[in-house]
């Protein structure tokens, strides 16, 4: 049985607004059930431990996915979400791969979290896949700072500058993720049409562009392991 570590944000505050952010719920639930249905064991962690904040916009009707509804009726999953492990207390060697869901939170805490950054470097150096979706690829920033050149020429997908502008949150974030990843040498790729699914697999690095890419990113990780995806 493959063991997947999912690392979620603990950050909720945005800049220049009273609005809050956190985990985009569908970017957690879609991959979570892809892994569970493939027979994988999933462990949840976050920088602070406990219950991660959830972006309120991800719970409004138009953004609710089938996996959101399944999660709401799943006491085991809800308990795991409410009691995530503090990342610094885990032994990363026990897992076969790591997955970072999005929501805007990661561009603050996971982008600067050294424990997370070192885990990514260690996994990539030891043949373990690293997957992230939407703003989750912000976790790659700290890894690239710890290991300069880590993203040089790597095909990477993430939430685009255009999508940031279209969501009207560009003034509420400290930097645009697409721009930062390019500055670190990434070969940034995206769908021609904003908010449509797009996934890039470059060796051990698997990244998705936006909420619609969450399930496909998990399926790409399952494909990496050589098992049929749900």
Image: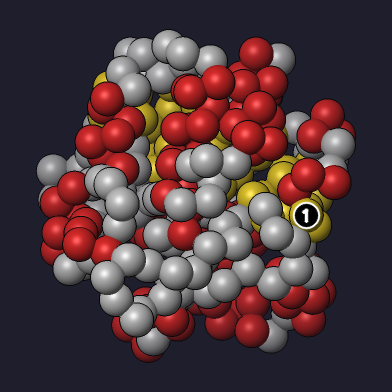
Viewer-proximal residue, 51 or 199? Answer: 51
Can residue 218 be seen? no
Q: Residue at x 59, y 41 (%)?
A: 113
Q: How is the image coloured?
A: secondary structure
Q: Position of residue 179 (x, y in %)?
A: 23, 36
Task: State left or right for residue 134 relative to residue 220.
Answer: left
Task: State left or right for residue 152 relative to residue 52.
Answer: left
Can residue 68 be seen? yes
Mark 1 neighbour density, 10 Å: few (under 14) some (14–19) many (20 or more): some
Q: Residue at x 47, y 23 (%)?
A: 144
26 is higher (above) or lower (below) than 191? below
Q: Looking at the rendering, which quadrant does residue 64 occupy?
A: bottom left
Q: Position of residue 226 (x, y in %)?
A: 65, 29
Q: Which corner quadrant holds the N terminus? A: top right
Q: Looking at the rendering, which quadrant does residue 60 occupy?
A: bottom left
Which residue corresponds to mark 1? 86
Q: Position of residue 6 (x, y in %)?
A: 66, 50
Disc 1 is placed on an element classified as: strand
Residue extending furthest front? 16
74 is higher (above) or lower (below) than 4? below
Viewer-proximal residue, 26 or 172? Answer: 172
Give the total number of marks visible in the rendering.
1
Q: Residue at x 65, y 13 (%)?
A: 125
Task: State left or right for residue 182 relative to residue 80.
Answer: left
55 is higher (above) or lower (below) than 49? below
98 is higher (above) or lower (below) than 171? above
Q: Residue at x 25, y 46 (%)?
A: 176
């Amino acid at each position: 049985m493959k063991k997947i570590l999912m690392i979620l944000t603990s950050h909720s505050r945005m800049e220049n607004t009273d609005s809050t952010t956190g985990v985009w719920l569908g970017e957690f639930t879609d991959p979570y059930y892809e892994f569970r249905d493939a027979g994988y064991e999933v462990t949840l962690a976050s920088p602070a431990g406990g219950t991660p904040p959830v972006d309120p916009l991800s719970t409004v009707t138009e953004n609710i996915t089938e996996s959101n509804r399944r999660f709401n009726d799943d006491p085991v999953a809800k308990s795991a979400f409410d009691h995530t492990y503090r990342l610094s207390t885990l032994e990363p060697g026990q897992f076969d791969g790591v997955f970072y869901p999005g929501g805007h939170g990661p561009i603050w805490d996971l982008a600067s979290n050294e424990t997370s950054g070192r885990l990514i470097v260690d996994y990539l150096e030891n043949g373990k896949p690293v997957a992230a979706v939407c703003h989750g690829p912000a976790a790659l920033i700290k890894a690239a700072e710890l290991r300069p050149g880590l993203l040089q020429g790597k095909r990477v997908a993430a939430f685009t500058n255009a999508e940031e502008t279209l969501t009207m949150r560009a003034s509420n974030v400290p930097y645009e993720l697409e721009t930062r990843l390019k500055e670190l040498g990434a070969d940034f790729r995206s769908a021609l049409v904003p908010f449509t699914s797009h996934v890039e697999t470059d060796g051990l690095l698997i990244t998705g562009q936006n909420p619609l890419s969450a399930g496909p990113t998990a399926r790409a990780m399952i494909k990496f392991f050589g098992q049929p995806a749900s």
